[in-house]
Amino acid sequence: MESQHLSAWTALSAEKRRHVVAVREQVLLDALQSSMKSLLQEEIQKQGQGEAFDKSTLVLTSGMEFDAPPAGTQAPLAMVWPMRLHEDPLFLVNCVTETLGSAYPWKALPIRRWADIVVPPPTTWPGFERSLARLVQQLIMQALPAIEPPRMSWAAMSSPNCDPMMGINIPEMTLDTGANNDDENDNDNDNDDNEDNDNQGKDEGTAKVASTARAAKRLRQRERRK
């Protein structure tokens, strides 16, 4: 059982829990009474050689009772369990878990499908106990609020990074539109122009030095000729 369900169930009073865990549908009552009658007759015919009715293991079977409606009312007969079994809110929950197994899911079924729990009718007392456990489970689940999946807030849904179909935030990504490349190319071109200008300045300075050196050489040659 989900922790939210368990908290909601334990929050109910013992009187409320007893009122909830009661089989009132006539089709279920008829099937259960018919199954009990057949099992009891089988034990009598076999003179005790059949499967024994063990109260220590068949807690739900041995503890159930039929609650007659008040006189003068049209309320149907109900299969209930005594108040002492409802004083501890976990008692029936543990009975269901031990009978069905810890891996058996606590899943609410539509009421129209509850008849499938007792049809075909159980042919053994352990099978009868299992049917009661499944009915008790459904009665408990019907009384508890449905647990809805967590919802995102409107602010989160309005976020530009939220996918409304999936309900999740999409990490922000930077797309390469080519503008950065153009800027980089412009920067590269500017660097190339600066390098060309530097090289051009260097070439002009070198040319001036070379010209001055040639002029000085010609001047020395003329002085020697004199």
Image: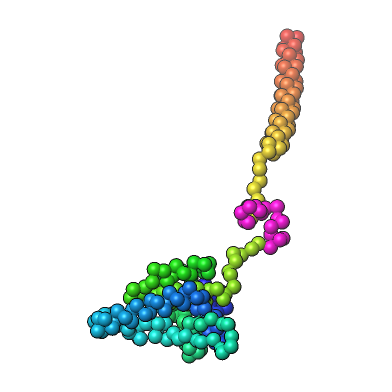
Q: Is residue 135 left or right of residue 206?
A: left
Comparing 201 with 90, the one in front is 90
Q: Residue at x 61, y 65 (%)?
A: 150
Q: Is residue 197 left or right of residue 83?
A: right
Q: Residue at x 75, y 9 (%)?
A: 226
**Residue 125 location in percent, x, y?**
34, 78
The image quadrant of residue 222 is top right
Image height check: is 149 above or below 10? above
Residue sitting farthest toward the top: 225
Res 2 seen here: yes
**Residue 149 location in percent, x, y?**
59, 64
Q: Is residue 94 left or right of residue 206?
A: left
Q: Residue at x 58, y 82 (%)?
A: 74
Comparing 158 with 173, the one in front is 158
**Residue 13 location in percent, x, y?**
57, 86
The segment highlighted magenta reads 153-168
Image height check: is 28 above or below 213? below
